[in-house]
Image (cartoon, rainbow, N blue to C red):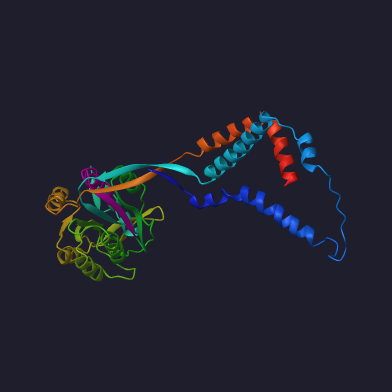
Amino acid sequence: MFEFHWPWAALLLPLPWLLRHVWPRLRSGAGEAHEAPATEQRVTLRHPRIEALADAFQTRRPRRRLAGWVYEALLALLWAALVVALMRPQWLEPYTEISRPGYDLMVAVDASHSMEALDFTVGGRQVSRMAVVKGVIGRFIDHREGDRVGLILFGTEAFLLAPLTLDRQAVSRLLDGVVPSIAGPATALGDGIALGVRTLRERPAGSRVMVVIADGDNNAGRFTPGEAAQLARLAGVRIYVIGVGSREERIPITEDGRIRYRDDLTMDEDALRRIAEVTGGAYFRATDTDALEAISTRIDALEKTRAEARTAYLPRPLFRWPIGVALAALLALGLFPEGRRRLLVGARGG
C-alpha cells in the first residue's frame, strides 16, 4: 500500500507560480507609492510607425522559444520532484504475526534474605533455598513450550522482571541471575501476588495462571497474602504455590559471610495452602519430585488462550526516486542556457 507520510507538504507545489505572478504586482504597487504627484504632467513621445519598429527589432527564433519552454518545464519538474520527496512517499508492507494458543503463566519468586537459608541438602552438601528455587522453576519453564511466561521478584518490594513472553530462554537467563536480597531483605509476598494479578488480568480469561514459590513469610508491602489471594480469585487467576523451606526450629543461614542459626525462618505452609485454596489452585512442596508434573497436568486442563493474529505495516521509504528525478532535471537545466536567458528577459519585461 502506497502513502505519503507528510501529504500536507503538497501545499508547497504552487509556491513558484505565486511568487512569479504575485510578487511583481506587489513590487509595482510599492513603486507607485513613490511616484510623483498626479498634478505633474507627463510627456510621452510616440513613434508614428511603432508596429513596424517592433517588427524590425523582433527576433523570430523558434529554437530559442522552444529552449525557453523546455527550461520552464524542467524547472517545474525539479520543484515538483523536491516537493514529492519532502512528502516522504513510502510503501507499506503488511507483516502478520500469529501467536499459537497457549497459557499465560506468571512466575513469582521470593528473592528476600530468607532465601539464603541452608535447609536443603543435595548430595550431602547444604544448598540454599534460592538454589532449589532456580532448579525447580528452571525445569518448569523449560517444559512450558508454547506458553507465555513472565517473571516477578518480590523482596521488600515487588518487581516485574520479565513481562509475559514466548522467549522462555530469556526468562530462564534472568532467573539464573537472581540472588537473595536483590529486591530487598524483607518479604512482600502479598505485593508479589497483587502485581502478578494486575499483569494477568489484561490477558484473556480462562488461562491466567500464577506459580508462586515462597516460604510463606510476609513482613512488608501494602497487601497481605489473604487480600492478594482474594484479588486473584476475583480476577480469575489460579495460583499454584510451591513451598520452599523446612519446619525445623533452628535453620542455618548465610549472613555476613558466616553461617548462623535462626529460629524465625520456619516455612509457613498454612498461609501458602490458603492462598492456593482461595484461588482454586494447589499447594506443593519443593522437595516433592512429582510437584512439577502435577502442576503441569492441572495447567494443561485449563482453557488455552486463543491464537492471536496481529498485522503491522512496515514502511519502506521511496524518497530516493523523486530525489533522482530532481537531480536529473537539475543536470538537464544546464543544457538549455538560452532558455534561462529568455526566461530572465521575459521576467524583466513583465
Report how many numbered discs are placed on residues in the image: 0
Q: Quadrant of the N terminus?
A: top left
Left or right of 260, for residue 242: left
Q: Residue at x 24, y 43 (%)?
A: 142
Residue at 59%, 41% (x, y): give it: 76
- Relative to 75, residue 160 above or below: below
In the picture, residue 331 is in which quadrant? top right
Residue farthest to the front, as pictured: 48
In front: 79, or 156?
A: 79
Q: Using the image, determine if residue 280 lies above or below residue 172.
A: below
Depth check: give the residue in front, 286 or 72: 72
Q: Where is residue 227 in the image (x, y as percent from the top left)?
A: 25, 71
Magenta range is: 133-154
- Residue 200, x across and y down, in percent: 26, 59
Residue 226 picture location, percent across and down: 23, 70
> Which quadrant of the view contains residue 91?
top left
**Magenta stretch: residue 131 in it?**
no
Left or right relative to 81: residue 26? right
Residue 112 image position (x, y, % from top left)? 34, 59
Q: Choose between 195 and 28: the one closer to the eye.
A: 28
In the displayed structure, 259 sits above or below 98; it is: below
Residue 143 is covered by the magenta coloring: yes
